[in-house]
Image (cartoon, rainbow, N blue to C red):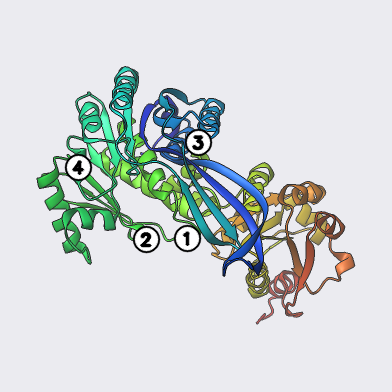
Amino acid sequence: MPFDLAKFAGVRVLVVGDLMIDEYLWGQVARISPEAPVPVVAVASESETLGGAGNVINNLVALGASVVAAGVVGTDAAGKRLLDRFAQMGVDSAGVVAVDDRPTIRKTRVIAAHQQVVRIDRERTGPLAPSVQTALAGAVRQALPAVDLVLVSDYGKGVVTAALIAELAAATKTVVADPKGLDFAKYRGVDFLTPNRKEAGLAAGLDIADDSDLERAASRLLETTGIKNLLVTLGKDGMALFCPGQEPVRIVAQSRQVFDVSGAGDTVLAVFGLGLACGQPPARAAAIANAAAGIVVGKVGTATVTPAELGQVLGPPADHLLVKRKSRDELGAICADLRRRGRRIVMTNGCFDLIHAGHIQLLTASRQFGDVLIVAVDDDASVTALKGPGRPVIGAGQRVAILNALDVVDYVTVFATDQLAGLIEAVQPDVLTKGSNLRLDQVAGREQVEALGGRVVLIPVAEDISASRIIAGIQNKGVTR
């Protein structure tokens, strides 16, 4: 039975953990400082997002859940920005305690030429003052009766303590925790712990090299720490679920091009917890979380998954090939984020009717000009107008499915000929590519792309390969090589 993702919207979640802001400075390096042998970064743009437990909240809100946040922020400007962001997202921040002597945690990353140059951490870690611990415990205690699920996002900054975990475990709620540190006994009583392979091995005192090592580590942790169940994330190898008295369950990761693994653990925590809260068996909840993590690591510059994206992966097999398909509005938001992060966007457009070796050559070469390749496919009516009766021979849905299956392609969209200008405005590609069978003055949208600061590149293609020639050969019962 397919799972109804709309059920996520009925779940109210308490997220307890280390709240922080992730800041990014995007720029370029043109020279080395005369003051010291370090690069000088000319900052072009700045952006920020919620980090730590805040990213778990990002994921929950994106999936429609209601959230109560519990943690600590400073009474500084960063703390106000964080609380303002919660208000904009509809997050209940009644469990957040503001303190004067502890700044809001900020991690500032300086990025140049797509590489992180330096990270600057502004934080004060260590135990909270007793009065703050008391206030936080009281806020958590007050929030617990109204929630269906508790998620603990521990980044080791001092908010999550054994005493606070004991308070949560004593409540009649499902508690799932993402751990930090070597002492998993701190999480005694939680229903599920979600470490990654390295964390599990270190906590168990074992080097996990194979499945046998993994099972020994899980057995040792379950026997010695007091946690009830264990879900170990294994990166490209998926996940392993360990429940006492049951055989381990392996969840295999779907093969997917990986762009960014950051935030995948937060997605697992959020989606696994939501699945449990909706009554799914642990193995099924883990499989849903595994699918969500696979989507997140395949994205560039974002760390959340939408119900529509997850529904495509969890739906009928044919839908699995449509996860890269985006609307113009979705592409606009994605590309705005990519530009903030300094990524180069390449777009190509065409009919792609009966995809052949020339198309693969075009797409592969196009991808070399940037970090992300967007393929815009003419809808069926546009193809008929361009190519004549009998075309396309393959409908837009099937053409999109084929393009989605290509690793070189990051996103696909369908458009009508008269929508090209709006699509270019939304995407604002750094490079628009077309085949060399056209002249520059024949490329539709060239002037608009150049006006937006981009350029058009003609990709050399074999002159004797075209869908029209192949189709004509088939119709004439000839042999096309």
Marks 1 and 2, how far apart in space? 9 Å
Nearer-N-terminus badge (1/2): 2
Tag 3, which secondary structure? helix
On the image, numbered disc 4 is attached to which residue?
A: 229
On the image, numbered disc 1 is attached to which residue?
A: 258
Above or below, 5 against 444 in this view is above
On the image, numbered disc 3 is attached to which residue?
A: 62
Nearer-N-terminus badge (3/2): 3
Circle 2 Cα neighbour tier, 10 Å, few/some/many (<14 / 14–19 / ≥20): few
On the image, numbered disc 2 is attached to which residue?
A: 236
Q: Who is closer to the viewer here, 64 or 75?
A: 75
Tag 4, which secondary structure? loop
Residue 478 visible in rendering: yes
Q: Residue at x 61, y 55 (%)?
A: 411
Q: Who is closer to the viewer here, 380 or 10?
A: 10
Amino acid carrying label 4: it is: Asn
Amino acid carrying label 1: it is: Val
Amino acid carrying label 3: it is: Ala
Nearer-N-terminus badge (4/1): 4
Nearer-N-terminus badge (3/1): 3
Circle 3 Cα neighbour tier, 10 Å, few/some/many (<14 / 14–19 / ≥20): some
